[in-house]
Amino acid sequence: MSTYKHGRKFTDDELIQAMKEHPMYGSTQLGRMFGVSESAIRDRKAKLARKGYSPNHDMTHTVPDGFKVKGVSTYYSHNGAVVGQWVKSSIDKERMHELMVESIHAMVDDLPRVSPCDSPIDYNAQLMAVYPLGDPHIGMLAWADECGESWDLKIAETVYCTMFDRVVRGTPSCEKAVIVNLGDFFHSDNIEAVTSRSGHHLDQDGRYAKMVQVGVKIIRQMIATALQHHKEVHVINCIGNHDDTGSLFLSILLQHVYQDEPRVHIDSTPAPFHYVRHGKVLVGAHHGHTCKMERLPGVMAADRSKDWGETEFRYWLTGHIHKSSVYKDELGGCSVESFRTLAAKDSFATYGGWRSGRNTQSIVYHKDYGEVDRHIVDIRQFMQLDEK
C-alpha cells in the first residue's frame, strides 16, 4: 500500500495511482489521504476527466498537460471488451494560461531587484496624478514613404521617454501617481508578429526579444521619472488585443523587479478591468476592445458597488481606437474617455484611412473635487525640441 505525505501537493499521476489502489474510496476518503478537502478532490477528478481519465467510461489515457479531450470513440467486441479507442484533443486555453504564468514567474525569479530611493520632500497628499498611456505599440515599424512618417524601436524609445519626462515635469508633485498602460504596449504578442485573436500580420521592427527589451527599458524609465516627482507610483498594465501575453509578463516582471522598492506598486492582476480609488474619486482602466464605452459605467457599478456608493466622481480611461473621445453617463455620474497614441501610423492605419492627433497627458484628481487639472504635451512639441 502506498503512503502519501499529508497536506502536500500531489500530482495527477499520484491521484490516479491512489484511485487504482483504493477503487472503493470516494472523494472524502481520498481527500483525507492527501490532506485536502473533498471539493478539491472533485475538482481534480473533473480536470482529469477533461484530460481523458474516466475509468468508469473506459477512458484511461490522458492527454499532455495544456490539452483537453475533445472527443473519445471507443470500440467494443461482441462480449463488451475494449478493442480500440480514438482520442481527439485540443488546446486547453485555461490551463495553457496557468502554465504560462508559472513559467513567467520562474523566468523572472533570478532577475535583479531595484533598490529603494528617496522620495520628494514636498508633495500634495490631496492630489493624485494619472498618466494614461494610449496604445504605445512598442515594436511597430512604419516607412515614411508609405505612411508619411518613420517609426521604429529607436524612435519609440526617444519619443516616449522624452515626452513622459516633459509631461511629468508639468504636473504637480502629488502623493500618488498612477501610470496606466491602456493596452497594446507591445505591438505584437509572438515571434511571428501575428495578432493572436484575428491573425493579422503586423509590421514589426526586429525580433520579438528586441521589442521586449526596449519596451521594458521604456516603462522602467517612466517609473524612474515618476519616482523623482511623486511619493508613490502605481502601475497598471491593461490587456490589449495586440499583447494579451505581453501585458501579463510585463506586470509580473515589474512586480519582481520592484519587489524591494516600497514606493512602487505593480498591479499584476490578469483582469480586463482595473480600478483605483482616491477619496471621492474612482478611476477605472480598460483597453476598450471587449466592452463598449456605454457599458463601462454599469461594469464599474457592479464590480465596485461599495466604492461606487462612496464616491462622487467616477471615470473610465480607455484606449484601442487611438483617438480622443468622451462618453458621459449623466444619470450614473460616470464619464468614459479614450486617449490618443504617440505612435505614428502603420501601414494598416494608413491604408484604412485612420487619422488622429498624437499627444500624451496627465490628469490630476483632488480627493474631494474630482478632476482639477490636466497637462497635455503634443507630439509637435517634441518635434520642435528635436529640431533645436
Image (cartoon, helix red, strand yellow):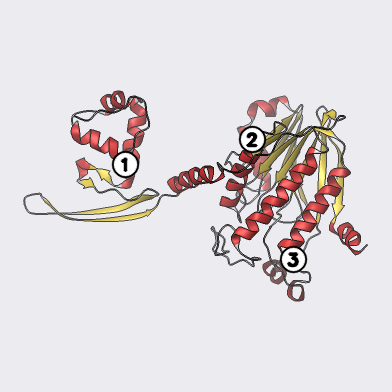
Residue 151 is labelled as 3
Q: Position of residue 315 (x, y in %)?
A: 74, 38
C-alpha gap between disc 1 and disc 3: 49 Å
Q: Which quadrant of the rendered structure holds the N terminus?
A: top left
Mark 2 or mark 3: which comes first in sequence? 3
Residue carrying label 1: 48
Residue 250 shows in the view: yes
Mark 3 element type: loop
- The residue lying at 10 percent from left, 49 percent from top is 80
Residue furthest out toward the bottom: 145
Q: Quadrant of residue 73?
A: bottom left
Which residue, given by chain and number where applicable, does mark 2 sit on? 259
Is the C-beta separation of discs 2 and 3 under 8 Å? no
Q: Are marks 1 and 3 in contact (CB under 8 Å)?
A: no
Which image quarter: residue 39? top left
Looking at the rendered image, the disc whose residue lies closer to the viewer, 1 or 3, is 3
Where residue 93 sits in the image (x, y, percent)? Answer: 45, 49
Q: Amino acid at mark 1?
A: Leu
Mark nearest the camera among 2 and 1 is: 2
Q: Residue furthest right?
A: 388
Could you tell which of marks 2 and 1 lies nearer the N-terminus?
1
Question: In the structure shown, which secondary structural element does the residue marked by tag 2 occupy?
Answer: loop
In the displayed structure, does residue 308 sit left or right of residue 12? Answer: right
Q: Amino acid at mark 3?
A: Trp
Q: Would you call the spot at circle 3 few (<14 residues within 10 Å), some (14-19), or many (20 or more)? A: many
Nearer the viewer's eye, disc 2 or disc 3?
Answer: 2
Above or below, 165 against 385 in this view is above
